[in-house]
Image (spheres, grey):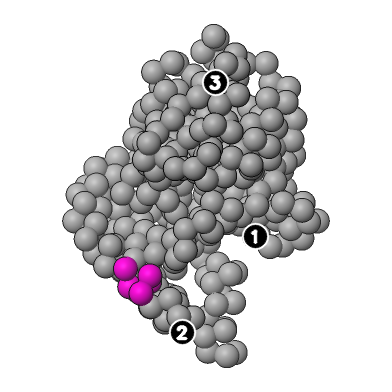
Amino acid sequence: MSKNNSVLFVVLNYRGWQETLLCVEAVLKQDYPNFHLLLIENGSGDESPEKLAKYKKHKNITFVQHEVNLGFSGGVNVGIRHAIEHNYYYTVLLNNDAIIEDKWLSKLVKAQIKSKASTITGLLLDGDGKKIESTGDGYSYWGLPFPRQRDEDVSEAEESGFVFNGTAGASLYETKLFEEIGLFDESFFAYYEDTDIGFRAQISGHTAYYEKSALGYHDHGTTSSKIPGFTVRQTFQNLPLFFWKNVPLRLLLPIGLRFASVYTLLYIRAVLRGQFIVATKGVLRSLVRLPGALHKRIGIQRSRTVSIDYLKSVMYMALPPNNKRTVRRIFHL
């Protein structure tokens, strides 16, 4: 294959073969001439291997089956290593419950060539196509990653431009990015692992770009909803790890004070909603993983090539919109 334009799609399946079938068929309809799909059965423990077995003989698909669930981070790392070993110029990470339009890949590649960004993401809508799921990811000065414009009307979608990061649920990456900054952090398992990659990329001088014309559709939470309490536990586990790994020393105090207050409020909200056990498990799991995060922090901060002022310029200075609503609810404002 030609190294300068080859693309590897990486799609994970976990107990969602029905959605995966639709996702794969959408990938196979792409008008881009040089792509391959790595389909990973991520230890579902159900009928998924049998339902997806028809793709084993497809010329554009490599089917990989794992007996245990490696999580999102571990699963996509299998795909990224494959992309590196086989010299794919681009790696696309696509959630199995996402559907992309036929020209999605072509538009992202063109946007990458134009922008020279290492990560390219598109306009991701909800399953009905009426609300925005994401126009890329942001990082707040309050220490919170968030999907830009979530739940806003499609008519309000921002124009194309540079963003903090692209969601790993539907984005294209230059494969060399992972060779330079490393793979996804498998201690995260799932949730915020993509913004972790995005922050590490920004620190190392890489950029991300949002292309409005590249449309995708995503039924948010289809996989995580199959595991009760999973989202809450992973949120409280990974948010502090993300903060301690990535935020530079000069920003630890101003961002840390804001983050501590919001993290506490989120915990109070979880308790009031009857989620004390899963939220507390997440906090405790974060503490257990903290020494590892601090060790990784050393290498990440040593790799920083951009100024603090630049990092502040690409951050969202206020509370993310969804978190503002949460704070209002807690205080009944």
Dot 3: what SS? helix
- Visible residue check, residue 279: yes
Q: Mark 2 points at which residue?
A: 272
Which residue is depicted at the point 51% across and 13% down?
Answer: 3
Dot 2: what SS? helix
Q: Which of marks 1 and 2 is nearer the N terminus?
A: 1
Which residue is depicted at the point 70% across and 46% down?
Answer: 217
- Visible residue check, residue 201: no
Q: Tell me which corner region of the image, top left, top right, bottom left or bottom right, holds residue 169.
A: top right
Disc 3 marks a residue whose amino acid type is Lys
Which residue is depicted at the point 31% across and 68% down?
Answer: 281
Residues shaded magenta:
277-281
Q: Name the residue under label 1.
A: 150
Dot 1: what SS? loop
Q: Which of 77 and 228 is in front in this view?
A: 228
Disc 1 marks a residue whose amino acid type is Arg
Crowd band around label 1 with a 10 angstrom C-alpha radius: few (<14), some (14–19), many (20+): many
Q: Which of 145 and 233 is in front in this view?
A: 233
Image quadrant where one finds the C terminus: bottom right
Disc 2 marks a residue whose amino acid type is Leu
Q: How far apart are marks 1 and 3 (CA)?
A: 36 Å
Q: Mark 3 points at which residue?
A: 56
Vertical arrangement, residue 170 with respect to residue 2, above or below: below
Q: Distance between the residues labelled 3 and 2?
A: 48 Å
